[in-house]
Every structure is written in structure tokens, then in C-alpha cells.
Amino acid sequence: MELTELGLDSWFKEKAGETCSPDQKIARVVAVDRGRFTVRDEHGEFPAKVTGKIIYSADSTVDFPCVGDWVCVQSRESEDFYTIHAILERKSLLRRKTAGKDIGYQMIAANIDAAFIIQACHFDFNVSRLERYLVMARESHIEPLLVLTKTDLVTPDELEQMIAAIRAAGIRARIIAVSNVTGAGIDQIRQAMNAGETYCLLGSSGVGKTTLINQLLGHDALKTSTVSDTGEGRHTTVRRQLIFLEQGAMLIDTPGMRELGIIDAEEGIEESFEDIQELALHCRFADCRHISEPGCAVLTAIENGTLDAKHYRNYLKLRSESEFNEKSYAEKRKKDKTFGRLIQSVKKQKGKRS
């Protein structure tokens, strides 16, 4: 496989020339599983390890490779793995807040051209959650496409109502309705993908992501679990990996996300709630927060029924969550740096005494 087939273009070639040393070459990270890496170049796939320099200089998980990254690697005849020395600058970086109470970033994938956001019609459909995924994709500068799966489990009228609810929330992204049972919509997804470009699937556990990949591959390459009586699938994917499709496109499968925390996503929120941003242009005050200010065009739109109140409340919720998590993360980083300087100071004092 040529590197161009892996997504290498002139932009990445230029970054490689600036980042990699003459004795290193470039490869793409195609799988990440519990800190273990697999990279691929024109000769095949190889296990890889990061250097100690990367480990000890990393400030956060953002500084480690993730699936989709282009990296500078080196191999030795006496070793059966590649050593990752550096990560090339990323065109896009898909991430979320770490699950639970910890404030930090969890890496999902890098250098993605478009994301298929998957929701199952039968049990998973939720416009507010869909808006969260849209914020995450747009904050990462990734084009979103919406896929409604398991359409065979709902009536045509119910499907139309779901699509209408999405449009009523001001969501303008393309929608593709799919049934993994009948095969409806699969060709539309194939046609939406271009050779040499990278796509990813985002969605909750059990919405049919793995089954959809098998449909696109034309055979059951990935393991799927049985479906319950409710139509709800069971979580299958446990690692992030880059999959190569016959038409030359690449697809990243990701584990289902039970939590989707938003952090530092102001740009993504603005792009995902374009209707509110357009209304905000007509507010009396330029710094209007759209909560209780006089002359607020957003609040006026809610009062006269031209803006959905639930859509507005989710906007406020995501904005508040993003700001709170961003502030908490900044405070945590400040404390970590202060503690690190204290440790270094103690070590220096001990060295002087000895």
C-alpha cells in the first residue's frame, strides 16, 4: 500500500520534513489498544512503542499518539517493532472530556475528514445527545454526517417525525437513514466516502456501528454481539482501529461512549447552534448571555415560538459545562505545574546537601 492510499498528502509531507530526522520515516497509527500502538507504512503493519522522551515530556494525553496520527518512526534490525519519536501536526483532533469526575482530555482519533454520528431509531434517538456529538465534531473541525440506524424497527411516519425533530433543532447536517437488516441506505454511505479520506463512526454502545462496518466491508470481519429483545445491541468494540474499505476510504471504529463530556468547546457550540448565533446578532447588547438580559433576541424568539425551548436549554447547558470544565482543567494544570516545580526544588536541595 502506498502512503498516499493511507491519506498522506502534500501538507503532511511538508510537516514530515519539518519534524522527522533524516534517519526516520513516517507511518500512520492504525490501532491503539490500552497504550499499545500499531503503525502502518508502505511495507505493512508493525507494533510500535513511544520513546522515553515522549513519555517524560508529555503534559497530557494529547501529547501521545492516537489512531489516525502520522508519526516519525525508526526501526532496528535487532528489534521487531518500530519506535515512535514524534507526532506530526494534526489537521483535526477528536477528543472529549475524560469520563467521571477527572478533568482532562481523552483522545479518540486524529486527522479525520468526516464523522458519521450514529443514532438508533428504536431506543437511542435523542436530539440533545446528538447536539453533543455535533459540538464535539465541529470543535474538532470535522464535517458531521448523521446516520439513523435500525429504521426497520420503526414505521415510516416515526422516522419522518425523528428527522423533523432534528431539523426543528436547527441541525442542518446531512441525514442518512439505514437498516442493517434490509441494507437500505448502505449505498448512500458508500457514496459519501472518498478514496484516501478518513472517516469515523461515533455513537453510543449498541447502535449498530460494528454491523455497519461489516456491511461496508461486505463480510463479517468484526465481531458483533446478539441483539436483545428491545432491539438494543450490546457493546462490542474495545479498541480504536483504522479499517481500509475496498473503495479506498478509511474508517475508524471507536468504542461506544456512555459519557460525552464537553470541555473547551466554544467554537463547536457556536457552529452547532448556528440558529441561536444568528439570533444573537440582533440582541441589544453585544455581550448578551441570553439568560435574562433586556432586548435579548434569543429570549424573544422563545417567547414567540420561533425557537425551540428545549434546544435553547441544551445550548445553555453545553455552554455552561464547557466553560466550567475548561476552568477546572486550567486550575488543575496550574496545580500540577506548581507541584512539579516543588518536586524539582526539593530534588535540587537534596543534591546540594549530598
Image (tube, rainbow, N blue to C red):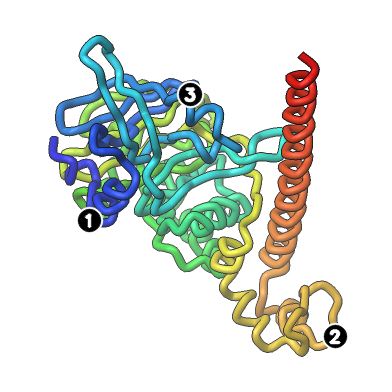
Name the disc covering residue 294, or none. 2
Name the disc covering residue 202, or none. none
Which residue lies under the disc numbered 1? 10
**Disc 1 vs disc 2: which is toward the camera?**
1
Q: CA distance from mark 3 to mark 2?
A: 57 Å
Residue type at mark 1: give it.
Ser
Does residue 170 sit above or below 91 in this rendering? below
Q: Secondary structure at mark 1?
A: helix
Give the residue displayed 72% in from the left and 39% down from the top. Answer: 337
Residue type at mark 2: give it.
Pro
Please give left or right for residue 303 compared with residue 167 in the image.
Answer: right
Q: Residues within 10 Å of mark 3 (few under 14, many from 20)?
A: few
Give the residue displayed 72% in from the left and 45% down from the top. Answer: 329
Give the residue displayed 53% in from the left and 62% down from the top. Answer: 166
Q: Secondary structure at mark 3?
A: helix
Check contact, mark 3 vs mark 2: CB within 8 A: no
Q: CA distance from mark 1 to mark 3?
A: 30 Å
* Res. 220 in view: yes
